[in-house]
Image (spheres, helix red, strand yellow):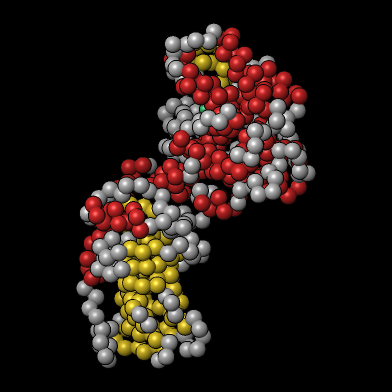
Amino acid sequence: MTIYTNDQVEKWVKDEYIDFLKDACLSKEDLDKIRNATFIFGADVPSSRYDADDNVFKISSGDMGSDWDSLSRALMHEFGHFISDMIIDPTTTFVSGYPLFGKYVGGKHNNWVPNEKTDNWGPDIDADQLAFEEGMVDFLAAQYFASKGIVYQDDLNTPDKALEVLSQLGRDKSTRIEGVVTSFLNEYYKNQSESGPKGPAQAVGDFMRAATYDPRHGYTWLSTPARTINEFIDAKKKSDQNDPKNECSPGEGQAGDLSGLAGKYGFDGKNQPIIKFRPNSESQANTIATTIDGMTFANPEIDSIQNLIPIYDTNYEFPPGTAPIIEIYPNNYPSDSDVERIAFDPETLNIFSVDPANVLNLQQGNAFVENSNVNTPNLNISHVETEYLVKVIEGEELVETISGQINLADKSGSHESVTIPEGRSVVFSTDEGFEIFETGNRPSSSKSISWIFGLLTVFTIAILTALKVFRAKL
Ligand SMILES: [Zn+2]
């Protein structure tokens, strides 16, 4: 049931937006553009849209019949495209609906499905650009609603959903996922947005100024406004460095950590490790859920692979039976063999953290390591195309090479580094230094490596599942 007439709705949207943006440090000309926006109600389109080639809003019959909560959200989302097209990044000279200059505004809108170049919905598009366009207009809508004390969309309001999706689908898709872009912008501008009644509008003002940095400072016909989230991050850095501050610049303590958040949301091109593990009983799932702080999942499902993006320098404790596997993906990894892997002994308590260089610090436990560097309390272990076992027990570190060779350095520097060839083991203690021997023939005692076979099985299942999930999402 629609309780507003079309004219009332059109006027409401414009008045609301002008009222909101009067605190966004915009020019009078820009506000006039909003006053001149044109709406067509009950249009014969599957969902409401803003058409950049004739500058009109087409509000679908379906949306007109929906409740006001949905309609107002749809209208504010579409209005964001108008702001994008008229104020941030004008498109001009359309040829059969395609812009000759500027960008193709809007497309299939789904917060959590990565955009593809061809989505069978419209023309081929740049997936990063579409994610930025749609992610940006949800950010604009979210800030408008925040100014009214209303949450626009729950799953865009905190980082949880975005991080969960990234851990499921892969961080390499981050720039193509609209909800990831929106969550990043919402988090970056959170403190400013919540700083007072004008906060949301000022956050939008700062966003718009940063996004338009290049055309304002370069040749307008050569320089485009930010059209992807990475271009925005670059433009924002330049704007912070070179633009004079204005009323919409974030104040003391209001600016988010741009580089830190870019890393958190996967926009920095680096690959953070993912911890995979599989609980095999309900109590184990509960143990995991209550043991790990800062996790990005909820209610781990029994018998399914769980992914967790570790928080750097946080200590993780995996009780016996949980057997996590850590995988670290290099940039654009060409093959599976480039992935670094560390699988933990399911029978021991494993305590570890991951440092910002993505190196694992094993404080206690046993691990099977493939092509990865590991630090122990006393050692830096660097690999050379290696598989090896590391065992850290109280006061002693034992390392066995399986293939390739490894270099071991004493962190304190009191014992000289050693290189351990294939089939050899070494035990290190701070007093005695390194003692090298043939694997299995430790002079005093050496435990069996039978647990590795169990681990390899878990590990193979994990990889197969991961590949299946990965393929299914392509
Ligand atoms: Zn849209």
Q: Residue at x 56, y 34 (%)?
A: 139
Q: Quadrant of the C terminus?
A: top left
In the figure, is residue 388 to the left or right of 66? left
Q: Quadrant of residue 218?
A: top right
Q: Is residue 28 visible?
A: yes
The quarter of the picture where residue 329 lies is: bottom left
Observer-nearest of 470 and 261: 261
Q: Residue at x 44, y 26 (%)?
A: 121
- Decide: is 460 above or below 350: above
Q: How many callouts does the rendering have?
A: 0
* 234 and 30: which is toward the camera: 30
Residue 70 is situated, as x and y percent measured from the top left of the image, at 46, 22
**Where residue 383 sits: x, y (%)?**
42, 74
Name the residue at 36% across, 73% down. 364
| Residue 224 visible here | no
| Residue 315 position within the rendered picture, expressed as x and y whole percent measured from the top left | 42, 64
Taking the spot 34% from the left edge, 55% from the top edge, the residue there is 290
Q: Position of residue 234 (x, y in %)?
A: 64, 47
Which quadrant of the figure has residue 213?
Answer: top right
| Image quadrant containing the N terminus | top left
In the image, taking residue 472 as reference, residue 240 lies left or right, namely right
